[in-house]
Every structure is written in C-alpha cells, then in structure tokens.
Image (cartoon, rainbow, N blue to C red):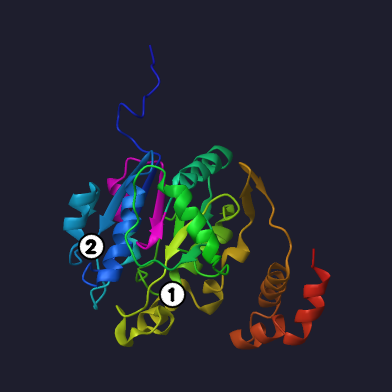
Amino acid sequence: MFQPVNLQTLNMSLITLFSAPKPFTDPHIAMIQRNAIRSWALLPEVEVILLGEETGLAETARELGVKHLPNVARNASGTPLISSMFRLARENSSSDLLCIINADMVLMPDFVEAARQVAKLKDKFVLLSQRWDYDITAPIDFTTGWEPGLRESVSKQDQLHRPAGSDFFLFPKDSYQDIPDFIIGRAGWDNWMIFKARREGWPVIDCTPSVMIVHQNHDYSHLPGGRSHYDHPDTDENIRLAGGQANIRYTILDSTHRLLGGKLARPQLSYLRFMRKIELFLRAIFFFLPEDMIENIARPKRWKKRITKLFKP
C-alpha cells in the first residue's frame, strides 16, 4: 500500500539558497557576508550552498554548518559563471525551489513563508523583491528575538531601494535550464532573469509588500578601481550574452503580480509602471531604431509632471 513521503524523514528542504560570496579578506565584507549566511542557516526548511574557492569561504561554511562546493566554473579573470552556479545548485539540491542570492542579503522567516505561499498558488514563477538598504558596522546578534530589533533599525533608516537591480531570484527547480555564461557580480544578468520569465510567460511575483529583505551596504573596493559593477568590462559581456540592451532593461517594474496577504494581485499602476509600458510598446513597434532614441521617446521629461499628477493617490 502506498504511503505518503515524509520530507522531514528524508531530510529534504523547501528551498535551496545558493551564492558565490566574495573573499573574506576585507573585514567589513567578511562581517556582512557572515551576517547574511548565518541568517540563512537559521531559516526553517532551508539548505545553503556556498560556491567557489574564495579566501575564507571553506572555513566559514564549516563554521556555520552549510554546504560548500568549490568547483564552480570561472571566466578568464577567475570570476564564477552563473551557468555553473545553477548547474551545481540543481545537481546538489534536495529542494523543489532554488534561490540564487547575493551574499550580503539578510533573510528572515517571512521569506520562507512567502515562498511557501507562492508555491501553493503557481507551478511556474520567479519570486523577487525590492531590498531595504541598511548601514551596518557590527555583527548582528542572532540571539532569540533578533528579527524585531533588526526590522525596527532598518525601518528607522528608511532606505527602500528603487525597483532596479535584484538581489535574489527564487524559482522552481526545473526552471532556468538554459542560463548563459553570465559573470556573477556584474550588471545585466539579473535583468535578463526577468526578461526570460516574461518571455516564457511565467508569473514574475514581487513580494516587497510581504517580505523585508535587508541589503547590508558596502563599497566597491573589491572591483578594479573601486568602481561600480556597471562600469566593469565584464558587464559588456553579460549584455552581449543577454542578447543586447533591450533584454537587460527589465526590472521589478516588469513584475506581473504582487504578493500581498498571502494572495496574488496585479501591481498598481504608477507613473514608473505606466512609462515602462509605453517604453515596451514603443520598442516593439520601432524595433529598428537605436536603443537610446527609444528611451528618449519613451521617457520625455516634459511628460513627468503631467503623468505624476494623473496617478497621484
């Protein structure tokens, strides 16, 4: 007689988080990465996979009790490739849901609850959100009841990041089977993730109203010249692999749903979303025009005040 499978007995998890942290040589970077990874390890029904051979990574994985896989493929400069990260995570995960995440992001149990709710509502999807930027100078004290204190401190700083740039993507294990050889830590690949989901017809679900995702602020001293990843040559390669500029202009504004109160709803129309719809329409009609010209047509400054007034609550 058939017996239902007990996931706890099989030691299976709901979500596998995977990430390729930076070296643990800079004291501030090391601190925020340890904060992030420790917060992940404390989550229920979550397993963590750290990828790469960066200094201090193996030791941190052992200390925090998470899985470490060193043999990730890299580009000529030694930076991990996202295609390899996805393959390793998929091959070594016992979860139905995978989540690629930057190693400076602190998660709390509301993240797991959001994933559980969405997985009940949709078979195919990608879950993302805006982040809360947070200035931090000391390790988080992960004693009992740490979440309310962190939430209060983050709320006081009141730095909800604009809906551009995504720091995690959560999706069913059988999605994103054809990831190009994007370079982690450079711009463009995260925008392509949203483009890919929209092209495939998967719901792109923004859980910002339901989840507080905390980004610990840092500088870019780990990059050549200390410049942002937007200015790095590898970003040009990511754009090429994505199929051009038009495919990396997708942001959280292109989400198809919002998670609110455990239910999915269509995003409210705002000035930014309205202008984004115009931009996509114009790009489809005038596909033969240069990218910059379309952007100037879609976002004329003289319209801004008029449209903003139109959509004021």
Q: Residue at x 65, y 88 (%)?
A: 293
At which x and y percent is residue 171? Answer: 46, 50
Q: Alpha carbon of mark 2 to alpha carbon of mark 1: how far?
A: 19 Å
Span shown in magenta: 86-106
Task: Answer whether residue 240 is magenta in the image.
Answer: no
Is residue 149 placed above or below 242 in the rendered structure?
Answer: above
The label number, if any, that marks residue 187 in the structure image: 1
Q: Which residue is mark 2?
A: 52
Q: Is residue 256 left or right of residue 237?
A: right
Q: Is residue 107 left or right of residue 19?
A: right
At which x and y percent is residue 186? Answer: 39, 74
Label 1 crowd (10 A; few <14 / some 14-19 / many >=20): many
Q: Residue at x 30, y 85 (%)?
A: 224
At which x and y percent is residue 273? Answer: 69, 67
Q: Quadrant of residue 81?
A: bottom left
Q: Quadrant of residue 9?
A: top left
Label 2 crowd (10 A; few <14 / some 14-19 / many >=20): many
At which x and y percent is residue 288? Answer: 64, 83
- Which of the pair 157/75 is nearer the observer? 157
Q: Residue at x 52, y 53 (%)?
A: 127
Query: In the image, what residue type sits under mark 2?
Result: Gly
Q: Is residue 126 visible?
A: yes
Question: Where's the C terminus, which quadrant?
Answer: bottom right
Query: In the image, what residue type sits under mark 1?
Result: Ala
Q: Is residue 160 visible?
A: no
Question: Where's the N terminus, which quadrant?
Answer: top left
Label 2 vs 1, first from the N-terminus: 2
